[in-house]
Amino acid sequence: SSAYHLAARAPGMRIAVIERDNAYKHASAMLSAGGIRQQFSLRENVLMSLYGADMLRDPSGLAVDEEVPDLQFIERGYLFLAPEQ
């Protein structure tokens, strides 16, 4: 995300992403169960979370040569359990 947003703001900037798995098949981000929380008290955190969720729901802005990446994002929600007391 950082590299993407830097490139969007400064197209001429040279940016390198250092990742042990250059195919991103075994990278931790690809293997995580993930989750999007929108339970923050600071307005800025809520806005960042909403922005990220919107990008995952509609990745058309990430298209390269008109090919939109399949992010395999499935929004399911959360379940919170708590005792009665």
Image (cartoon, helix red, strand yellow):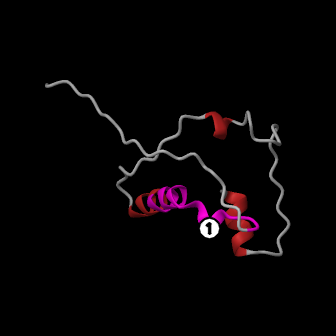
Name the element at disc 1. Answer: helix
Percent x, y of residue 16: 84, 56
Q: What type is the residue that disc 1 sits on?
A: Gly
Residue 20 versus residue 71: which sits nearer the camera? 71
- What is the total number of numbered labels drawn onto the structure image? 1
In the image, is 25 to the left or to the right of 82? right
Give the residue displayed 35% in from the left and 55% down from the top: 41
Percent x, y of residue 71: 60, 49
Image: magenta residue range? 50-65
Q: Main secondary structure of the magenta part?
A: helix
Task: Give the labeled residue for mark 1.
Answer: 61
Q: Using a 10 Å C-alpha cutoff, classify the residue at mark 1 as few (fewer than 14 neighbours), some (14 to 19) or many (20 or more).
A: few
In the image, is 82 to the left or to the right of 65? left
Q: Quadrant of the C terminus?
A: top left
Percent x, y of residue 14: 86, 66
Q: Quadrant of the N terminus?
A: bottom right
- In which quadrant of the rendered view does residue 77 lie? top left
Check the image and report above or below for 22 versus 11: above
**Residue 84 is covered by the magenta coloring:** no
Residue 46 versus residue 79: which sits nearer the camera? 79
**Residue, far left:** 85
Give the residue displayed 54% in from the left and 34% down from the top: 33
- In which quadrant of the rendered view does residue 4 lie? bottom right
Percent x, y of residue 7: 74, 68
Check the image and report above or below for 23 versus 48: above
Give the residue displayed 54% in from the left and 55% down from the top: 56
**Residue 57 is covered by the magenta coloring:** yes
Check the image and report above or below for 51 versus 28: below
Residue 40 versus residue 71: which sits nearer the camera? 71
Give the residue displayed 38% in from the left and 52% down from the top: 38
